[in-house]
Amino acid sequence: LKTGRDLDAITVALLDADAADTSIDREGRNPRGREVLLAGHGALRRLSDYCTAADQHPRQQRTSSHRLFTYVSLWYDVILVESDKPMSRLVDIFCPSWSNARKVDALVLRTTLQECFPGEVTCRVLFVPESLYRDSDRHTAALTTVDTPGDFAIFLERVLDSTEVRKYKRRALIATPKWCDTQSIGRAEELVDLVMFKTPAAQSALAGSFERPPQVLVGFSSPDPKRQVERYETFAHFGARSSNRGSQILLDLWRRRPDLPALHVQWYDAAAPLNFPKWLQRDNVHLLLQHFPKHDEYFAELARHGLQLSFGPPESFCHYHNEARAMGAVALAMRSESLSVAELEHGINEIRLMSSKQRSESGKLARQTYEDERKAFSLRLREAIREHLLTG
């Protein structure tokens, strides 16, 4: 019985365990050559059933060479797969465990890579304790979720070093100026085969920092909320935990301008409180001092406001702005380090002068821009990963 349906580009032969040609040598080769051997108790099962079970036992699925053969040790059988092309390679994404934004980064990266390389790449996210990022004297990357490294590693923000990390075939870094101190750059020079940047500002700030590894601007994207804004009447600003989003400037402006439409500000960082006492709140200012642990709750609140005000440093990986555009919001974005109150007021007044139809058309354009940038990110990421990590 031969089928190529269950695994792409793989010829499958299901052979009776009692047949003479079911033997394999120490190198994992079968006398029949380039086929798949299923050694069992005479029972034929769909190959997809075995693959599903194999996903639950990733350590048993891997071999030391992991070139052409994949062994799956189940509770009763062994499968040997030999293919004309390499099997799926495992990419480990190292993510700081304390950062919600970086967790979103990791999710987007994992999803995009698996879409770019269907069947070729499988990704998993390894969460790294904060101490390993902040303590520059520590070099141990604790693999708390697995005890076997994958084929390739991608580090978010900071390169870690350990015996396990050095077992990866190749490693990449998504670099940001905040975390690239002298020691981290030196570690990247030794261990990293590719440096990627999310924004031109980050690439410019770190220009000349890396000499050996190639450097590529890949951009970034954000999850699609799959929601549409409900109306284009109220302004909103979601500050999250960042103290560099211009939230205080907005509140000061609205406190001076009671004529402005309603503004909804979301904030939940106790370490950086807003200077806006509750007794100063007016009818046009609403503070939402809470965190949304679930994305659905966060997106539902975001979708209630079609006029979004987004601020951040130029190197910021700002999911909030992307998510607002994905919902079709009219999004005013400004850089926090050069934020001018006069420019801010001008931008807000321009939005206020727009008709309902103009706001709706602007929202459609924002959604299209989000989709275009998402495709561009996918293409640049695929090219960079294929050229510098997967090739060779």
Image (spheres, rainbow, N blue to C red):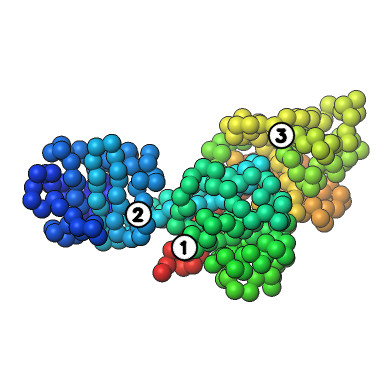
Location of mark 3 (residue):
233
| Label 2, label 3: how far apart the Cα atoms are | 58 Å
Label 2 SS: loop
Looking at the image, can residue 105 be seen?
no
Q: Mark 2: few, some, or many residues within 10 Å (few <14, many ≥20)? A: few
Amino acid type indicated by mark 1: Lys
Name the N-terminal-most of marks 2 and 3.
Answer: 2
Q: Which residue is the site of mark 2?
A: 63
Give the residue type at disc 3. Glu
Can you tell which quarter of the image residue 372 is in? bottom right
- Residue 179 place in picture, x, y as percent: 70, 57
Name the mark nearer the viewer: 3 or 1. Answer: 1
Q: Earlier in the sequence, mark 2 or mark 1?
A: 2
Question: Around disc 3, counting alpha carbons within 10 Å, would you say few (fewer than 14), some (14 to 19), or many (20 or more)?
Answer: some
Task: Residue type at mark 2: give it.
Answer: Thr
Q: What residue lies at 42% left-to-right and 67% top-to-bottom? A: 391
The foreground one among 130 and 303 is 130
Instruction: Look at the image and tell me in which quarter the C terminus lies.
Output: bottom left
Going by the image, does 37 lie left or right of 141?
Answer: left
**Measured from the top left, where is residue 199 in percent x and y?**
65, 60
Do callouts 2 and 1 mark residues in contact (Cβ within 8 Å)?
no
Q: Which residue is mark 1?
A: 169
Q: Which circle's residue, 3 or 1, is located before the other in the chain? A: 1
- Looking at the image, is 228 positioned above or below residue 331? above
Determine the residue positioned at 57% across, 65% down: 191
Count neighbours of disc 1 (C-alpha within 10 A) and say few if under 14, some if 14 to 19, many if 20 or more.
some
Residues under numbered marks 3 and 1 in contact, where contact means CB atoms less than 8 Å apart: no
Q: Secondary structure at mark 1?
A: loop
Residue 374 shows up from this direction = yes
